[in-house]
Image (tube, grey):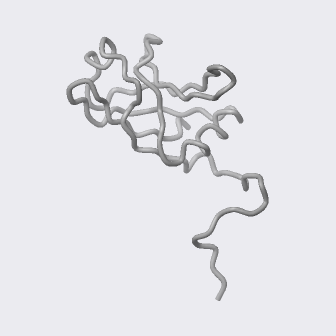
Amino acid sequence: MSGSGGGGGGSGGFESVDCSSVQLRTHLSSPKPAVIKTLQKNDQLTVELQNHGGRSVVVAKTAKGQEAGSITGSGLAKLIECLHQGHPFKAVVISVEGGGCLVNVTSAI
């Protein structure tokens, strides 16, 4: 029996990523307090890729285009790869506590 579990590394490139299955649950980094205080559970944010000093940064924005914060965490590399390929994502607000915001990032299609 041959499995494909565990392990990583190897070829120096990514295998083909199934972008529709990429999912992250994370707190927004560098949250913008004025925007965060307007968010409620189940609000939907757009997920965009931006270039900051030659580095790819993923941000979550409201329907009005206000940046709520950036997305980091496990699976970020796959998310960035999919965004580079033009695959759309959304972030749904799970909770807002104080100045923090927990979101679930999934495919928008």
In the drawing, does residue 15 fall left or right of residue 42?
right
Which residue occupies the extreme front position in the image? 53
Question: From the viewer's perspective, is residue 68 above or below residue 12?
Answer: above
The image shows residue 54 at horizontal and vertical percentages of: 69, 24
> From the image, which quarter does the C terminus lie in?
top right
> Which residue shows up at 64% across the image and 21% down it?
51
In the drawing, does residue 44 fall left or right of residue 85?
left
Question: From the viewer's perspective, is residue 102 above or below residue 21?
Answer: above
The image shows residue 91 at horizontal and vertical percentages of: 43, 33
The image shows residue 44 at horizontal and vertical percentages of: 39, 27
Count of picture labels: 0
Question: From the viewer's perspective, is residue 105 above or below residue 7?
Answer: above
Which residue occupies the extreme left position in the image? 98
Q: Name the one closer to the observer, 25 or 32.
A: 32
Q: Name the one closer to the observer, 55 or 90.
A: 55
> Which residue shows up at 60% across the image and 26% down it?
49
Quadrant in which residue 63 is drawn:
top left
Which residue occupies the extreme bottom position in the image? 1
Q: Name the one closer to the observer, 49 or 99.
A: 99
> Which residue shows up at 72% across the image and 52% down it?
14
> From the image, which quarter does the N terminus lie in?
bottom right
Q: Name the one closer to the observer, 97 or 30.
A: 30
The image shows residue 107 at horizontal and vertical percentages of: 53, 40
